[in-house]
Amino acid sequence: MATATLFVTRKFPPSVGGMETLASDVWATLSAGGDGRDRLIAHGGPNARMPLWLPGAVLRTVRLVRRREVGYVLVGDVLLYLLLRPVLVLLRVPHATMAMGKDVVWRQPVYQRLVRLVLPRAPRVLAISAATAATVVDAGAPADRVVVVRLGVRLPEGGPARDAARAELKRRFAVPEGATVLVTVGRLVRRKGVAWFLDTVLPEVPGAVHLVAGSGEDADRIAAAVAAHGLGDRVRLLGAVDDVDRELLMRGADVFVQPNVPVAGDMEGFGLVAVEAAVRGSLVLAADLEGLRDAVLPGETGELLPSGDAEVWRAALDEVAADPVAAERRAERYASRCREVYSREQMGAQLRLALGAASTPPNR
């Protein structure tokens, strides 16, 4: 009989974010590929409440393992693994941890010491991109214990067609006819490069309107860039949006832009939202940086552009504006390929293979 897996994660819906979406997808693929015996322990609330959730999560983990209801534990990220590893070792249960990127490189000194002490001892680390895997190895983990798992997304079901979505988006957000609609969705943090894009690229692309959805610590810098360049009539700062508007933005955009820039102590582990946008038919232009290299396959599911090279970004957007029909055909081709490469089914198969529960060596 196959070994049942317990997935423990501190990020899960109804909380909203990339890690929450990823955790939901991981659980969906694990549970769909099993026989109904897999178990989930998840925190779906704010970070401030995690200390209240953790003791109960530990007790439930101990109970499930001791009762032999599960024989393998997958931890959702490195931070949580640092907290759970002593218990997993005491239980002598085969286990693995996922690695997201920032959870490995966060430059807090005490945290970094713990990462470099504990992570090399993990029996197996499932990295969400090649860039994340490299950071895990740099932290001291043996390369033969690190596995890259290509992520998958839930394919959209129903919803408006592209033309209808584009028309509704322009009406909903007062976009002038003839404008190239650029969309960015995600947490507004410095590494996302939105402030850089508004400072150096958009002012030189006069036919474009940029819809920015999300909230975060970089919101003030972004608003300052809009004001400094007089972009108030061409940029819509939408703040956090609900699922309906998020879906509309990704279905109706001409171009989904993710212009990340390098930031010390932070990184894009994968870039799941770029896949979500591409599979819905938006033409994805993303920075050739970190985990985005796994999320966007150049010429197959989108385009990668040099991070920080404003001239190249401007030229790419000018090309879209010059021939929108050709750009739309490219996006359609990329969407079709994206559905093949980033399906939940392939992620589930890779997860099961990577976990290899029945043949996992004893904990070290």
Image (cartoon, rainbow, N blue to C red):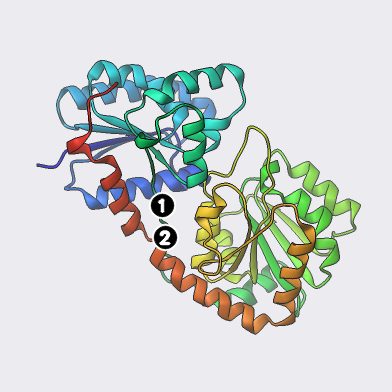
Mark 1 belongs to which amino acid?
Answer: Arg
Q: Residues within 10 Å of mark 2 (few under 14, many from 20)?
A: many
Which residue is found at the position 43% from the left and 27% from the top? 80
On the image, the x and y values in percent for residue 185 come to 62, 55
Decide if residue 285 is in sight here.
Answer: yes
Q: Nearer the viewer, residue 358 or 4?
A: 358
| Image marks 2 and 1: residues in contact by CB distance under 8 Å | yes
Quarter of the figure with residue 266: top right
Which residue is found at the position 21% from the left and 37% from the top? 357
Q: Is 160 rendered above or below residue 47?
A: below
Mark 2 belongs to which amino acid?
Answer: Tyr
Residue 24 located left or right of residue 244 = left
Q: Nearer the viewer, residue 142 or 74?
A: 142
Decide if residue 160 is in sight here.
Answer: no
Q: Is 146 rendered above or below residue 154?
A: above
Which residue is found at the position 61% from the left and 53% from the top? 241
Quarter of the figure with residue 187: top right
Marks 2 and 1, how far apart at CA: 7 Å
Q: Which residue is mark 2?
A: 342
* Label total for image: 2
Which residue is found at the position 64% from the left and 84% from the top? 325
Q: Quadrant of the C terminus?
A: top left
Residue 234 is labelled as none
Q: Which residue is mark 1?
A: 150
On the image, the x and y values in percent for residue 83 come to 41, 21
Say whether disc 2 or disc 1 marks the residue closer to the N-terminus. 1
On the image, the x and y values in percent for residue 96 come to 33, 33
Badge 1 element:
loop
